Amino acid sequence: MKYQSMRLLCMFDLPMETSSDKRQYRIFRKELIKNGFTMLQYSIYYRTLPNRSAGKRYQHALQSFLPQGGEVRLLAVSEKQFADMQVLVGHRSYQEVLVGSKTLVTI
């Protein structure tokens, strides 16, 4: 089995009309963070994974706390594809620069 480091992106668009919608949004976001996801942009979170089978494990974990409405999408990309992402406006976050493609970072 070949191990290839990858990133799992979770992109979501959730309704924010009622107080129940807002509550489900907060719960979903907090669960993403508990599961090791980091915010890339509003409504786009990512997590570094050692391989695709680990990605399946997180997919099953996310399914346990999905909100009732809206859209949630997962996209798995290789570390090289993620590193090749171009920032057209703004800049890379401090965490992106610090971590980069490293699997272990100590501060």
Image (cartoon, helix red, strand yellow):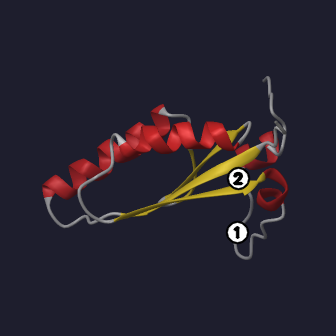
Q: How crowded is the residue under tag 2: few (<14 C-alpha within 10 Å), some, or many (20+)?
A: few
Q: Residue at x 79, y 23 (%)?
A: 106
* Residue at position x 45%, y 41% in the image: 60
Q: How far across and down, in percent of the image, does residue 62 sit?
A: 43, 43
User: In the shown orientation, is residue 89 left or right of residue 5?
Assistant: left
Q: Is residue 8 left or right of residue 78?
A: left
What's the mark number on residue 90? 1
The part of the image, by quadrant, that contains residue 104 is top right
Q: Residues within 10 Å of mark 1 (few under 14, many from 20)?
A: few
Across and down, in percent, residue 17 comes to: 19, 67
Between the residue at mark 2 and the residue at mark 1, the CA separation in whole angstroms equals: 9 Å
Of residues 83 and 98, the one drawn nearer to the viewer in this rendering: 83
- Up-down relation of residue 30 to residue 20 (above or below): above
Circle 2 sits on which residue?
Answer: 93
Amino acid under label 1? Answer: Gly
Q: Amino acid at mark 2?
A: Ser
Q: State the SS at label 1.
A: loop
